Image (spheres, rainbow, N blue to C red):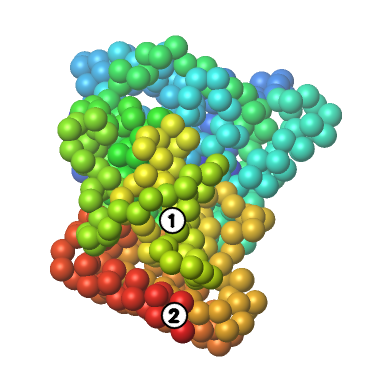
Amino acid sequence: MTVFILVAGAFTGPHVWRDTAARLTAEGAEVHTVALTGLGGPPADGGAAVDLETHVADVLAVIDPVIDATAEPGGKVVLVGHDYGIHPVLGAADRRARSIGRIVYLDSGLPQDGVPALAAVPDQLLREEVAERATGSGDGVMGGELPPPARDEWPRWGSTEGLSEAALDGLTALAAPQPLGTLLQPLRLTGAVAEVPATGVLCARNGPGVEMLQIMVDVGTPALRALADARVTFFELPTGHWPMLSCPDALAGTLIEAASGGGHLLTPADAGHTPAHLRPFLLDVPERPRERTGNTDLYLPDGPGPHPAVVFVHGGPVPAEAMPTPRDWPAPANYPILAPLPAWGLTGSRFHPVRALSRAGDLPVVLVRVGRESAEIAATVEEFVAEAARCGANLEIIDVPEGRHGFETLDPADGAREAVHRAVGAVLARLKG
């Protein structure tokens, strides 16, 4: 029998797993939901401050009796950590590595030794608020609590897409304050947990899906290299950050598959294949000499000027260690992400293309729109197009119904070639006009 031990994220407790746990039990699994101290569990003894080690001990208190009762150590115990919950899960698994069959990272970060959970909070302003609250708590760094989000504040912690109004009401009503020490105390790992098989369940409405993760591995993101391992599998759910509330049956089915080792495997960056971003560009572009100054490459046309200028700005994020750098990639991008995605943590930043439209005046804008775009990026495009219509922006759209994000390198067929020709032609026509 597979034994699932489920650990919820920030501000939440065992109640969020109710429907998922019921489905797992119906499928013949044994399920334990961990009540973390202060988050659905009893308060700390003697009013002591609650920190990450407190929650690691809470998880161990559930694991150890299960291990004692399991005839096959390490074979069937599956630890599931959602959001913040992955931190105490890893802390506990590191101390019982030989007894754990698999760890499931449920829409969580990749915690590292010596790094506190606060570093995984996507919203920079939230991180600053937590740090300020800890400094001013008067109880020391590990004292104090962070109040739970109000109903309209949950998106700062993750996408609420897929949640019904009732589910969002319940999430808010049952939320508990998060002890500051659980976010501020560094995670301590010996390295033993690295040997435990793992599965990542990606919520594609809150961050990258499997395909985008593969692209990030290909680019050479150092923290992701270890994910291209035969012991690491991935699943993707088309929902926001709380799948146990938005699609509990689908999540339960995914966890059952994960327990048996199922899921998608990533290809290592050095596996001998040419990653999409380094494949030859689908248009035959003549070589031109360039002048390289700082972070800018300048390609000058023949003949006397003045000449119009085209500025290419690459996408990202791209790790600083990636080689070659984007300026030497053969493929220029021709479609953007038009608003910050939920997991980016860019609240309060200057990255707001939609807002800029109202000040664009008659400036021509050419937008390539792909029909198979990921839902979270497509939403930013729809918002941009709607705002362009509202303020009368000079917008021309090049539609590629069968295209997906990266189509000119992932699917360099005739349709992609024609779409890029049309997009480049539209820009050149605007420049000549």
Q: Is residue 12 visible?
A: no
Q: Furthest-front residue in view? A: 304
Q: Amino acid at mark 1?
A: Tyr
Q: Which residue is mark 1?
A: 299
Q: Percent from the top left, x then y, of residue 312?
A: 45, 58
Q: Percent from the top left, x then y, of residue 9?
A: 50, 40
Q: Which residue is mark 2?
A: 432
Q: Quadrant of residue 118?
A: top right
Q: Is residue 28 left or right of residue 163?
A: left
Indicate which disc, 1 or 2, sits on the residue closer to the N terminus.
Answer: 1
Q: Amino acid at mark 2?
A: Lys
148 and 200: which is toward the camera: 200
370 and 433: which is toward the camera: 433
**1 relative to 205, above or below:** above
90 and 295: which is toward the camera: 295
Q: Percent from the top left, x then y, of residue 398?
A: 34, 77
Element assignment for label 1? loop
Element assignment for label 2? helix
Q: Which mark is residue 137?
A: none
